[in-house]
Image (spheres, grey):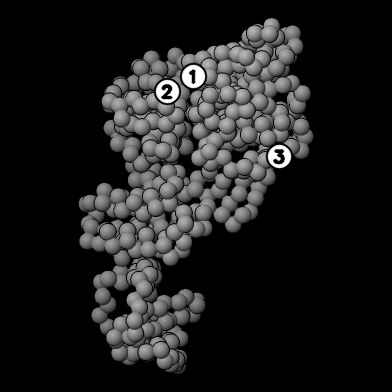
Amino acid sequence: STKRDEEGARILDGVDRGGGGAGAAVIDGRRRLWRRTFPGADWALAATLALGILASPVDVRVDVGGAESSFRPSSPISVSFARSTASALTEEQLLVSDVWREVTRQYIDPTYNGLGEDGWKKKRLEAVQKVTGVGPDDKEKVYGAIRNMLGALDDPYTRFLTPEQYEALAAYARGGSAGVGVQLLLDPGSGRVVVSNTVDGGPAERAGIRPGDVVVEADGMDVSGATAEVVASKCRGEVGTEVNVAVRRGGGGRTADGDGKVIYFNVRREKVKVNPVVSSAFQSEGGKKIGLLRVSSFSQETARQLSDAMAELKRGSACAAIAIDLRGNAGGYMPAGVDAAKLFLPPQSTVTSEVNRSGRTVVYTNDGVGSDATVPVYLLVDGKTASASEIFAAALRDNDRAVVVGETPTFGKGRIQNVQPLEDGSAVAVTKARYVTPGGRDIHRVGIAPDRTSQTCKAENTAADCLSGIL
């Protein structure tokens, strides 16, 4: 039996036939089971079709109207029969099945958003039926069926990537030579990629791209359904080359509603130097010296840069408190958020926990090396503070090391994805685990609410504005 035939048999068997009739189950030497009911069929026909699946000794169990008979052939049996084309999947149907199988294997929620195993199997069958008769030249129909199937999970981070999108993501992971200086974030409300921040003086900012813009096209590719990483990869390339970026502007608020007009930009790629940590100081309304650490993203260098910036602040007059500005910080490298939090926590403090679908938990704790657990800390956040930034913020807040200040809750991204490549060059990103704060909270789609609400803590406000009336 070929892999395709086995897959076809499994999917076709997903239909509840109901009623009477004959049925057969086949178990081969590797103990694989194939079962099929044939309503109204003669039991001999059922047995003959079942035996035709494998050219080796098999156990056969046949049900006829509720009665069961069994026999085992003493030698290999050769049976000639005409197999229905319905039991062999096309390449398009196999792609649907491959996506379904990877999600089934990895997805964090074993209930599949309340569908249950049977409901999730039904979604596969529906998707397979939708692509019946669809040829290789009509991939968009196949991709649409897959995305519709995944949409039943109500998880914007579990998504299908076309071969072009996956190749772009792989190129991004390999490292590009230049970019345009933007931070991007997937908005779960709209399913679109949003500009969360731009590098000061960078190509995107100079061209006129703004935080809050929704990216609809990059380098000639429609980025509907793409991840933030895929869009970022399309913006990267050789120094001096141009990339066309189309954004939808308008709507405002915490999430982009995409109701505004589309604006097109030609942006020249440059070597963009991003300094994730910038330090300074200001005087509070009460006359106290406040150290300010602006953290725009989390990279492998962030923890070291934070440590150096803290040491620099200590060389002058003592700071009454430290303000860490995380507004617009969409995250980045998750371990960097963990390592940065360790700088401010007592030894053996819990930083965060990672929980998979089986409930297995990995706890990240502070080893205590180089920690500064005494200076008061204030964290400035907004609706675009996400992912690694939220891990950092929750670790300090739940360990009573910081006061969170902002106008709105943070973004609420508390999930981990794995990107699984498929045989045709496409891929599927699957949510495989979740983060839990030291206090045991799951912040996904909820975010971290400020301890102190400040109405003067928008992106355009200074840190001193945010802390007005607080310090």
* Image point (39%, 53%), residue name: 152
Quarter of the figure that contains the C terminus:
top right
Residue type highlighted by circle 2: Pro
Q: Which residue is mark 2?
A: 211
- Using the image, determine if residue 271 lies above or below residue 341: above
Could you say which is closer to the camera, residue 65 or residue 392?
65
Residue type highlighted by circle 1: Ala
**Can the viewer see residue 277?**
no
> Residue 140 vs residue 31: left or right?
left
> Residue 344 vs residue 175: left or right?
right
User: Would you call the spot at circle 3 few (<14 residues within 10 Å), some (14-19), or many (20 or more)?
Assistant: many
Q: Position of residue 302 (x, y in %)?
A: 61, 26
Residue type highlighted by circle 3: Thr
- Are the two marked residues, 2 and 1, in contact with CB atoms closer than 8 angstroms? yes
Earlier residue among tags 3 and 2: 2
**Can the viewer see residue 248?**
yes
Q: Secondary structure at mark 2?
A: loop
Q: Which residue is mark 1?
A: 459
* Image point (50%, 45%), residue name: 417
User: Would you call the spot at circle 2 few (<14 residues within 10 Å), some (14-19), or many (20 or more)?
Assistant: some
Mark 1 or 3: the one toward you: 1
Label number found at residue 350: 3
Question: Residue 225 lies in what quarter of the image?
Answer: top left
* Image point (45%, 44%), residue name: 157
Earlier residue among tags 2 and 1: 2
- Using the image, determine if residue 290 lies above or below residue 35: above
User: Would you call the spot at circle 1 few (<14 residues within 10 Å), some (14-19), or many (20 or more)?
Assistant: some
Q: Position of residue 69 (x, y in %)?
A: 43, 92
Give the spatial CA distance, label 2 vs label 1.
9 Å
Q: Secondary structure at mark 1?
A: loop
